[in-house]
Amino acid sequence: MPDLKILVVDDEEEIRISLQEILDEEGYDVAVAANAAEAREQAAMGSDCALVDIRIGEDNGIELLRHFRENRPHMPVIMISGHGTISLTSEAFKLGAHDFLEKPLRLIQIRASVRNALEAARLKHEVSEHAKAKYPMPIYKSEIMVSLYQQVDRLAKIPKSVVITGPTGSGKELVAQALHFEGARSDGPFVATNTASMPLSLAEDELFGHEKGAFTGAHAKRIGCLEQADGGTLFLDEIADMDLQVQAKLLRVLETGQLTRLGGNKPININVRIVAATHKNLDALVKEGAFRHDLWYRLCAFILHVPPLAERTQDIPLLAQAFLASVCKEMQIIHRFSDDALVYLASKKYPGNIRELKHVVTRAAVFANDEEIGRSIVESVAGGLPSNAENARLSGTPASNYGALDFKSAREQFEKEYFNSVLEKNSGNITATAASIGMAQSNLSRKLKELHLR
């Protein structure tokens, strides 16, 4: 049995002793508290699960539950009561209690509830650790980004909703990840979704999930994004384009802390922090009636703005070198930018912001022949793939006479030359080639088959 710490909070000494003995026998490290102040102090020193009486002398167990959910959202809390009511039970679950046990407590019930709570917490922690491993640390040195991430550091510790604005490709999701992984909910899941382009039915299914048999093709239960993010953060990208009916249902979930899966009739309690993002002016959309004003006011407790890359050119050389290191690792090659290449990259305009810069760096790595990537290579790929003549110069192969071919034949000829080039660059490795050009491996394999390439 691992060293798991259980906190027992009850004003009755006999019950504290009894629960301590039961949990001791299970191999847990047990701490006890007779009031809310002691409980907060014990929890601050670290606890994996808490059993809290609904009434702790003059203290309110529901308020203690609220405190735990705000300050230790990853810690499951089991409420116990000798005089439970439907309203108290409902409120406890709404706040995110894992379970509600009534006195007199039964031995088998206590053991099962604690085991289930710890197992649920363990699974959420594993998901969180997996997400953390993939969380890229923000890269910046410009004053405007230093100021932004100072705000992020403050808001990360406050479990309130945040709206992130900024142009497409500016890195809004990275800011959302920082709000999650640098805050109190970092042990909980971070779930990202974009329902903007989905039909109503798919958007509802994405957010709320469905029960088995809810509709044709629903052969199994599906957990929606809101439920997946319980105890953590749900990032809603491009929320301005969300269907108005979905907005109404999302608002209801945020107000009640409960959702119902499609085809279900049982409310499910969740505790989720919403971080939403948009490149549009939500204030204007609210005035036009294109976005619900009540949902907007619910979400906009805090607003962060991510500036375009044009307002933080100091960051471009740092970002370019980081992207190049990542591409080289994927392709198992060695490249570095020359000083004049970095100067050129910093001077270039990027309408697509960070996303566009990353594409330019990837193309430069693919088409460079030498270890050092000079300015000429970067210039040749800055607007897209190199021209046929430029590609011939870079690769050392003669240019094709595209003008003598019809469009279909010219495109096929270009695709053959392009894929031959990137395959050669990656020593024929399909996985590395697909990663380097941002293409799914299955799609690349199918394309190579169509072009009769090996």
Image: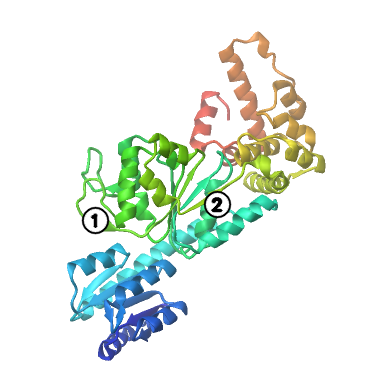
Residue 305 visible? The answer is yes
Quarter that holds the C terminus: top right
Front in this rendered view, residue 387 or 153 = 153
Location of residue 214 (image quadrant)? top left
Q: Is disc 1 in contact with disc 2, using a CB cutoff of under 8 Å?
A: no
Q: Is residue 417 above or below residue 255?
A: above
* Label 1 or label 2, whichever comes before in sequence order: 2
Residue 153 pos. (x, y %) = 57, 61
Q: From the image, tell me which residue sits under label 1.
A: 267
Q: Residue furthest front?
A: 287
* Rendering coords of residue 229 (x, y %): 39, 55
- Front residue of 390 and 401: 390
Q: Residue at x 54, y 46 (%)?
A: 172
Q: Residue at x 35, y 43 (%)?
A: 247
Q: Which mark is residue 175?
A: 2
Tag on residue 394? none
Q: At which x and y percent is residue 386?
A: 69, 27
Three-letter code for the amino acid on which mark 1 is drawn: Pro
Q: Is residue 44 left or right of residue 77?
A: right
In front here: 50 or 38? Answer: 38
Quadrant (top left, top right, bottom left, bottom right) of the N terminus: bottom left
Helix, strand or loop status at disc 1 = loop
Q: Give neighbour class at mark 1: few <14, some 14-19, many 20+ (Cα, 10 Å).
A: few
> Which residue is pictured at 65% across the width and 39% down the height?
357
* Vertical comparison of 397 with 39: above or below: above
**Location of residue 15 (image quadrant):** bottom left
**Within 10 angstroms of label 2, few (less than 14), some, or many (20 or more) residues?**
many
